[in-house]
Image (cartoon, rainbow, N blue to C red):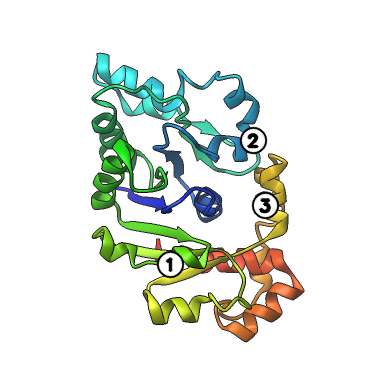
Amino acid sequence: MGKLYTIWSPMHRQTATASMVAMAFGLEDAVLTHTQSQMSQLETMLGLNQAAKNKVMDNAGMNAILYAIDNHKISDEEIISSTIKVRKSGLQILPALGQIQNGDRNQLLKYVISDRLPKIYDYVFVDLAAGDRGNDFELTKALWNDASVNFIVLTDGHLWEPYAEKYNIPNAVYILGAYHPESRFNISSFKFNISKNVATIPYCVEYYDAISAYTVPEFLMRNRNAAQEVKGNVNKKHFAVKASKNDSISYFFKAISEVKSFL
């Protein structure tokens, strides 16, 4: 039985999707999907931008599974055939664009994500809809209760709140995304004020350039051994500052490897 990991942020543009893709890279037998009915960066940042733009995936991926469940008992093979192997990365994605909007949507999504995918894959990563409003948040809360780890991604210091307590999120781990060790809103401050259960993913300009250029798979593969070039714990401030100035890519991948210790 595989494990389910959710990634959530209180607001959009908190690097949750980017953090999830980086975390999943390099893991064997992992699948990525999302529950966002209105907005998702997952498909486009993995090079499927034209397919997403032309809506050719609207009746594929997760939608195809949901339609099939409405009509018959779907097999594991049918679910596997609905995923896409992302070129040059080893990643698998279950696209979820243009999701059907009916009264059973949340129930069906929860069934696929919580009950079926972990029986097929060792690692199931789910990018949850940002925020705490509307029908999407009801699904978010249900998936939190099923997950092995729930990652809460924050970048801006003004968003720092004890969300794990506020929403009663079990198995919560905070991630400070786009992190810079020289900021006064650093991991030491977070541990003192919010929670000690926290890791960082530093800002890496090369990674975010790859996202904008739709070349994330190539970037990940090209730098897959970069973490090995960094020795020590990246969250020790003086070391982190030195490492980030010397080689932001190696520092980024070393931090990702430390986040994976929570998996």
Q: Is 256 on the left-hand or right-hand side of 251? A: left
Instruction: Name the residue type under label 1.
Output: Trp
Instruction: Name the residue type under label 3.
Output: Tyr
Instruction: Name the residue type under label 2.
Output: Gly
Q: Where residue 47 is drawn, which disc sits there?
A: 2
Label 1 or label 2, whichever lies nearer to me, is 1
Q: Nearer the viewer, residue 154 or 262?
A: 154
Measured as percent of width and height from the top left, residue 120 is found at: 35, 39
Q: Which residue is mark 1?
A: 160
Badge 3 density bin: few <14, some 14–19, many ≥20, Cα 10 Å: some
Mark before the other along the chain sequence, 2 or 3: 2
Q: Which residue is mark 3?
A: 208
- Label 2 near label 1: C-beta < 8 Å? no
Label 3 or label 1, whichever lies nearer to me, is 1
Measured as percent of width and height from the top left, residue 244 is found at: 69, 73
What residue sits 28% from the left and 46% below the top? 143
Mark before the other along the chain sequence, 3 or 1: 1
